[in-house]
Image (tube, helix red, strand yellow):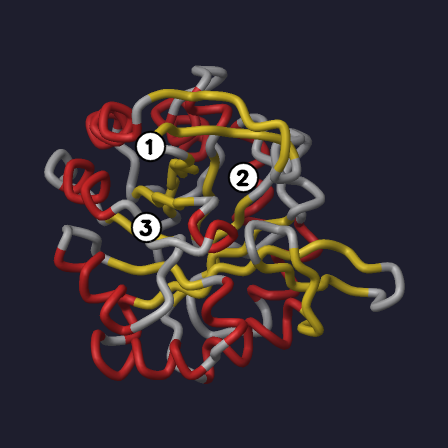
Amino acid sequence: MITKRIIPCLDVKDGRVVKGVQFVELRDAGDPVELASFYDEEGADELVFLDISASHEGRKTMVHVVEETAARLAIPFTVGGGINTLMDMKKILRAGADKVSLNTAAVLNPELITEGARFFGSQCIVAAIDAKYDEELKGYRVYTHGGRTKTEWEAVEWAKEAVKRGAGEILLTSMDNDGGKSGFNLDLTSLVSESVSVPVIASGGAGNASHFYEAFTSGKADAALAASIFHYKETSVKEVKNELKERGVRIR
């Protein structure tokens, strides 16, 4: 049985870590380099760094911040935001990232996943999916540009397409649950987890350690990501891991 992973997420805007609710009402949460170093020492299994306004603002990820952050880490490090070409991927991986996260650019040009997997290996390519329940669709619709743009894709179908094209992992965020601290979207997470053969990272809604347990059991996720509850010290990676171990979940 594969061990489950706990992953703090650094949403970065203008060089600072921020966190909001349902992708809006952002507030400052600290310096990305300092927070990354803190989570490394605290026992996080991996770290995700998302330049959340890069695609919307039409610019590249801040490479210098990636370099500074990577220099302080001994754990795997995924970077996303404003990565639109193979050259962008190469720059981010050379700056110290272990994986690149593709969201908007991959939906607009799915061939980018194929090319990235071919050049760097599927293990380097994470397909990030921001999804929101759509009454008309009776399912979850994929959004791009930091949750601002509705697409024609349904979340499960896009996840399958991304994996078919070579994505080695899915980072799945429920926009409905994001920042609400009421728990992960177990329906969405289990639907995607059961539909693809690669690891799925649940994201959006973590409020306490029990929510991680639910994501791993009911949601069938392989990893779970959180931001605000860790950034604002409402709980810690160690506390979450200790509770999961007590409840029989295999943790690194």
179 relative to 76, above or below? above
Marks 1 and 2, the one that precedes in the sequence: 1
Q: CA distance from mark 3 to mark 1?
A: 10 Å
| Residue 207: quadrant of the picture | top right
First in sequence: mark 3 or mark 1?
Answer: 1
Query: Height in image: 1 above or below 72?
Result: below
Image side of residue 100 versus residue 244, left or right: left
Task: Look at label 3 and name its amino acid.
Answer: Thr
Residue at which label 3 appears:
61
x and y, in percent, of residue 205 in the image:
61, 37
Q: Earlier in the sequence, mark 3 or mark 2?
A: 3
x%, y% of residue 217?
A: 57, 49
Q: Quadrant of residue 1?
A: bottom left
Q: Residues within 10 Å of mark 2 (few under 14, many from 20)?
A: many
Of residues 212 and 112, the one nearer the viewer is 112
- Residue 49 percent location from the top left of the image: 34, 43
Q: Which residue is mark 1?
A: 15
The residue drawn where x is 38% and y is 33% is 14
Residue lying furthest top in this view? Answer: 233
Does residue 38 appear left or right of residue 57 in this picture? left
Q: Nearer the viewer, residue 49 or 47?
A: 49
Looking at the rendered structure, the kind of residue marked 1 is Gly
User: Which residue is the site of mark 2?
Assistant: 213
- Vertical order, 75 against 210 (above or below): below
Disc 1 to disc 2, how far (Cα)? 32 Å
Label 1 Cα crowd, 10 Å radius (few <14 / some 14-19 / many 20+): some
Q: Amino acid at mark 2?
A: Tyr
